[in-house]
Each structure stands twice: as C-alpha cells, then as structure tokens.
Amino acid sequence: MSAYRDKDPRIHGIQSRIRVVPNFPKSAGIMFQDITTLLLDPKAFKDTVDLFVERYRGKNISVVAGIEARGFIFGPAIALEIGAKFVPLRKPKKLPGKVISEEYELEYGRDCLEMHLGAVEPGDRALVVDDLIATGGTLCAAMKLLERVGADVVECACVIELPDLKGREQLNGKPLYVLVESH
Amino acid sequence: MFAGDQNGLRGDPRLKEISEAIRVVPHFPKPGIMFQDITTLLLDHKAFKDTVDIFVDRYRDMGISVVAGVEARGFMFGPSIALAIGAKFVPLRKPRKLPGEVISEAYVLEYGTDCLEMHVGAVQLGERALVIDDLVATGGTLSAAIRLLERVGAQVVECACVVGLRDVKVQHGLNGKPLYILVEPRGQINCPAPSVNGVETCRHDDLILGANFGSPVNTTSKSD
C-alpha cells in the first residue's frame, strides 16, 4: 500500500523535498534518498507524520518501534500522536540495559539490531518505522525482535520504498505502507 | 537553568513523573557511570508527551526557526518539538552519516577527538536555533553543536536537555549560551563530576566513587 498510489495531495510536496545524492555512501551508482531536506520544510515534515498518524490512529497500536537512526526522527512523533510507546531498535552496544539481538545479512557481512528486554510485552500491537525500505533486511530483523517477545506486528511503515529491490517480499507477508516510491 | 526552579513549573508534578520514568543503569558503559536511560521515559506515553509539551510551551513563542538535534537520542525529542513550534529539524550527526556536503566540528575527548557534522545549507544566516539532546554531561558535544550553528551565522537561543547536573561550570561553559534542563540525574553519588579542564570524557559523567573504587575512571568510550 502506498499513499503515492492513492495520490494524496500532500505526497507531491513530500516527494519533492527528498534529495537524491548520487554515489553515497559508495560510488558505482548508488542514489541515496536523503530525507534531511524533507525535515527542513516544516509543512512537508508535518504532512509526512500526519499521513502516518491518520492511518494508525484508532487502530490500537500500543508500540511504535523505530530503527536507528532515521527511524528515530519519524517514530516518536507518530507514537506521541497515536498514544503508543516508542521503542528504539539500535545498533549493538548502544542500549544500556538487557537486550535481545537479531542478526541480519548485509551485501557483504552481517549486522545486528537490538531491543531492550521488557520494553515490549506479549500482545503489544506494533508498528515498525524507518525512513526507507531497500532490501527489507533491517525491517525483517526488527519484526523478528518484536515477534520474539510476543508482539503482533501490525504493519511496517516507511517514508520511501525502493520497489526494484523487492524489500516488500521479504516481510513474511506483513503489510508495508509507504508514502513515496523511488525507482 | 532548571525547569523546576522557575515560577511556572515549580512543583509541577510532571517533572517528578519525568524524573521517575528515567531508568538508572549502573556501570554503563563503564564501571562507575550511572547511566541515565531515557528509553524508559519513551515507554511512558504520558511522561514522554509531558516532556515534549514542557519544551514546546517554553519555545513556541521565541521565534525559533530551527531545532538541531544531536545524534542519536536528540532525534527522539527534537523532531516532535520542531513540528509543534513550526520549526525545521536539523540532525547533527557523527562523521560520514550525512550524505551531502557537510561542515564538521571536532571536540575533545579525554583521549582523542570526536566530530559532529551538519549539512551545508540546512541552516541560514540569522536563523534562531534551539539545540536539543537527551542529556548534558560536560557539555562538550553541545558546545560543538553551538559552534556548528554559529559558523553558518545562526543565533543559538538556548540548549535544552531532559537530564543534566547542577554543574556551575557547564552552565557557564556552553559558550555563554543558556542551558535549560528538566531534571537532574538520579542515583548519583554525591560528589562533583570530574571533567578535566572541561574536556568531555564520555557522554555521561564519570563518577569518582571514592577511595573504595580506586583511581578515577578514565574512559574514551562515547555513548550516544
């Protein structure tokens, strides 16, 4: 599902504020989708958060899990508006308390996402938020963390999808909602 | 200045709830450090909302056009404040995270340096800026943030943190900029936090736990 396809009038402003930076972080054709320029436009940033809030308000979402670090920019604002708690999912050794960890594959090598034990409880209805979905590896790890503690992942929400990388298919059937697509 | 020192918020029960919602994790990231863990505050919707509301009430009429948040925990508070007061949000990040052209500001750790970056063009000459982070220790990171903003000609109105010590030196040492703090850290041993000539040793205070613990903890680890 994407608001892009629904053609909400706010989408154009949001998409136009996202800056594409070629060859970051590596050369050879990577076109980096930079959301920091979106954050410089208060109306477009507010519209971004509003689109998510409108979708998830009243759906009994009890936890919004945001993926470090750009998921921290969108997730808490959504959580506050819909009455949910916010849980940061972080790189290793950042969270001070007891954590559970989930490894995931990168193009070369592996990385790891961690969540505090006790932050999410069995039966919590969860939303996972990040700025962008590419291959879906990180989102998949995030969902696993939540499901391991007995939460029900209701949906994954991202500002941007790169559909050519087919990340949507990696989500074990969980729905994905995005605002804009970039090919 | 502390929120609770001011007439409007003196005795405000929200401050007590915010303080109690913050978990203290002993000996993280190193022995002797009583880490102020704000993730438990984020789990308490009312206390988290109150935190943001108190900042918003303070800054809404100050003509602030940019909220700069320090990676990564500054990202958890800054954007909501920015959205509520109609300001833009600018992330201040560790090196090589921001994709576009950046300016960098180094700051000194006990051993070596670290660096904060901001996108060129994000902030304009004359803008009024708020800097936000979860906690202030020695103020090294916040000072670097202030310098970044001033280098592009912005005026830093204030630095705001959820947690901070009543450290006179820090209050005077943030390049003369005012510092606004909601609550003091809990679980502290009652002695002054060492900072070597204002040098940031760690993002949280090193505590000397007295003779029992031997010599002061020297740490180079950055906890963000």
Image: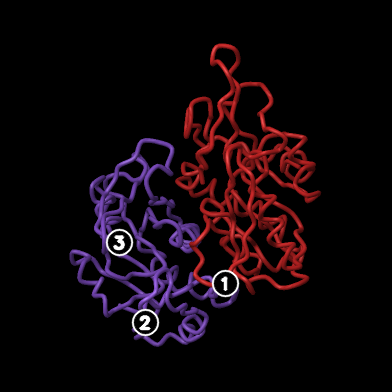
Give the drawing colour for chain B.
red
The purple-tinted chain is A
Mark 2 — residue? Answer: A182
> What's the amino acid at mark 3?
Leu
Which residue shows up at 58% across the image and 77% down it?
Answer: A43
Q: Secondary structure at mark 1?
A: loop
Q: x%, y% of residue A11? A: 45, 83
Question: Label 2 amino acid?
Answer: Ser
Q: Is residue B200 above or below residue A110?
A: above
| Rendered location of residue B104, percent (x, y) | 62, 60
Estimate how packed mark 2 is, as few (under 14), some (14 to 19) or many (20 or more) residues with alpha carbons within 10 Å.
few
Q: Which residue is mark 3?
A: A139
Farthest top residue in view:
B212
The CA span between labels 3 and 2 is 18 Å
Residue A51 falls left or right of residue B215: left
Task: Specify the subunit that label 2 lies on.
Answer: A
- Give percent across and percent down for residue A175: 26, 69
Identity, as a three-letter code, of the amino acid under mark 1: Glu
Chain containing mark 3: A
Q: Which residue is mark 1?
A: B101
